[in-house]
Image: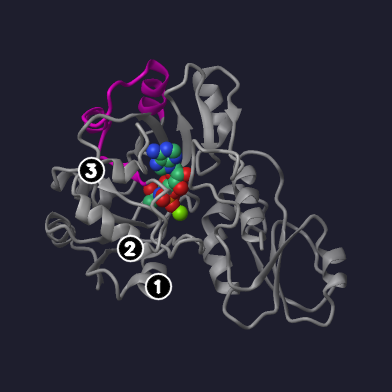
């Protein structure tokens, strides 16, 4: 069932059940992070491997402090500036957080999401919420309650509908346990904003298999069922695939020379708008009617870096 009843959602969570929750990035599949049975259910419903750890969600910086050993000054600075918002901090966990949540790691990923319904929900319960994106493992993340309902509606008792996700890309993850913080996942908060806040250049270490620090960053991810190709030059790629049923995921003022079905992430070339539309448009094109989806590569700057990361992973076979 989908609805806007925060108290009902809280009651399910208190019973150890799993609930779909809205955030500004993507919808989450939430359970009581301190209840191992609830956490187990999340992995089961999502069909997620246990080596891929979960982010915990809290209502404030004060609440985050209850679950970590320390809050280094750089982490504090980022939290004060960007929470609530699309930023996840990796910190040393304390004993309250089960190792099941962190896949055995001493570090826990934590964030304060920016959605009024979920913030109210978090204030209502006295535990943090462990929540991965509410999609079956490996598929495109959900940015509306409807996306969640379609794929997981039968597996969970309730989806809290907080409207479409404003940002539309998962949170940026920063490991703050190191003297110089390291970016582990590109996401809804541009790296440049984090670097400006800290007044230092940061190392970005997101590549999949060589990165045991962010185990969930598998190369094949965000993958539609339809063949998906990332292109620097749409018209060239279109010629190459002539004769097939083609859908194009375009961006900006970029004229297509053939008659194909086309969605444009942002005609005005806005990266914010493109991020907001990305997963919804990918899902719309992945409807079984096309042989191939050809996506235009975006400019490698700001949110364009995170969007290209998702497009590239979607194209891994
Ligand atoms: O925006 C978001 O972050 C969304 C919303 C629901 O908050 N959540 C999300 O969760 O994207 P998920 O499970 O799809 O991705 C979580 C990723 C893991 O795959 C892993 O890369 C990283 O966060 N992560 C979580 N806990 C970690 C830990 N203890 N150590 C290293 N990486 C961790
Ligand atoms: Mg995910």
In terms of secondary structure, where does tag 1 sit?
helix
Which quadrant of the view contains residue 44?
bottom left
User: Residue drawn 70% across and 42% down?
Assistant: 300
Q: Are marks 1 and 2 in contact (CB under 8 Å)?
A: no
**Which label's residue is closer to the chain start, 3 or 2?**
2
- Residue 291: percent from left, percent from top: 70, 79
Q: Residues within 10 Å of mark 2 (few under 14, many from 20)?
A: some
- Determine whether 293 is above or below 126 in the image: below
User: Residue drawn 61% across and 41% down?
Assistant: 207
- Determine whether 48 is above or below 32 in the image: below
- The quadrant the N terminus occupies is bottom left
Reading the image, the residue beneath label 2 is: 44
- Residue 313: percent from left, percent from top: 62, 55
In terms of secondary structure, where does tag 3 sit?
loop
Cα separation, mark 1 vs mark 3, equals 25 Å
Q: Which residues are magenta?
A: 54-81
Residue 128's label in the rendered image is 3
Residue 120's label in the rendered image is none
Dividing the image into four equal quarters, which quarter contains ligand 2?
bottom left
User: Residue drawn 29% across and 71% down?
Assistant: 155
- The quadrant the C terminus occupies is bottom right
Please give left or right for residue 200 compared with residue 232 in the image: left
**Which label's residue is closer to the chain start, 1 or 2?**
2
**Which label's residue is closer to the chain start, 1 or 3?**
3
Which quadrant of the view contains residue 243?
bottom right
Reading the image, the residue beneath label 1 is: 151
Q: How is the image coloured?
A: one colour
- Residue 17: percent from left, percent from top: 19, 61
Cα separation, mark 3 vs mark 2, equals 19 Å
- Determine whether 214 is above or below 79 in the image: below
């Amino acid at each position: 069932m989908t609805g806007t009843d925060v108290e009902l959602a809280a009651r399910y969570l208190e019973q150890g059940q799993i609930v779909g929750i809205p955030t500004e990035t993507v919808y989450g599949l939430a359970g009581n992070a301190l209840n191992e049975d609830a956490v187990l259910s999340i992995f089961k419903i999502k069909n997620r491997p246990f080596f891929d750890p979960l982010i915990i969600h809290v209502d404030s910086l004060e609440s985050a402090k209850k679950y970590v050993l320390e809050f280094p000054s750089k982490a504090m600075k980022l939290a004060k500036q960007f929470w609530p918002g699309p930023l996840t901090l990796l910190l040393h966990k304390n004993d309250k957080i089960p190792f099941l949540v962190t896949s055995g790691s001493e570090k826990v990923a934590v964030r304060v999401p920016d959605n009024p319904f979920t913030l109210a929900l978090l204030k209502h319960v006295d535990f943090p919420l462990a929540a991965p994106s509410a999609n079956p493992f490996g598929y495109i993340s959900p940015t509306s309650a409807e996306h969640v309902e379609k794929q997981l509606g039968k597996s969970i008792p309730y989806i809290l509908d907080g409207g479409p996700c404003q940002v539309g890309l998962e949170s940026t993850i920063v490991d703050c346990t190191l003297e110089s913080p390291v970016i582990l996942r590109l996401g809804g908060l541009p790296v440049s904003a984090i670097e400006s806040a800290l007044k230092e250049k940061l190392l970005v270490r997101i590549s999949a298999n060589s990165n045991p620090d962010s185990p969930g960053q598998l190369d094949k991810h965000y993958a539609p069922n339809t063949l998906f190709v990332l292109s620097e030059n749409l018209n060239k790629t279109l010629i190459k695939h002539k004769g097939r049923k083609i859908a194009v995921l375009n961006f900006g003022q970029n004229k297509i020379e053939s008659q194909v079905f086309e969605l444009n992430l942002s005609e005005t070339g806005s990266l914010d708008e493109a991020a907001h539309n990305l997963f919804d448009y990918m899902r719309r094109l992945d409807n079984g009617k096309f042989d191939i989806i050809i996506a235009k590569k975006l400019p490698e700057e700001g949110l364009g870096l995170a969007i290209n990361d998702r497009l590239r992973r979607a194209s891994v076979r």
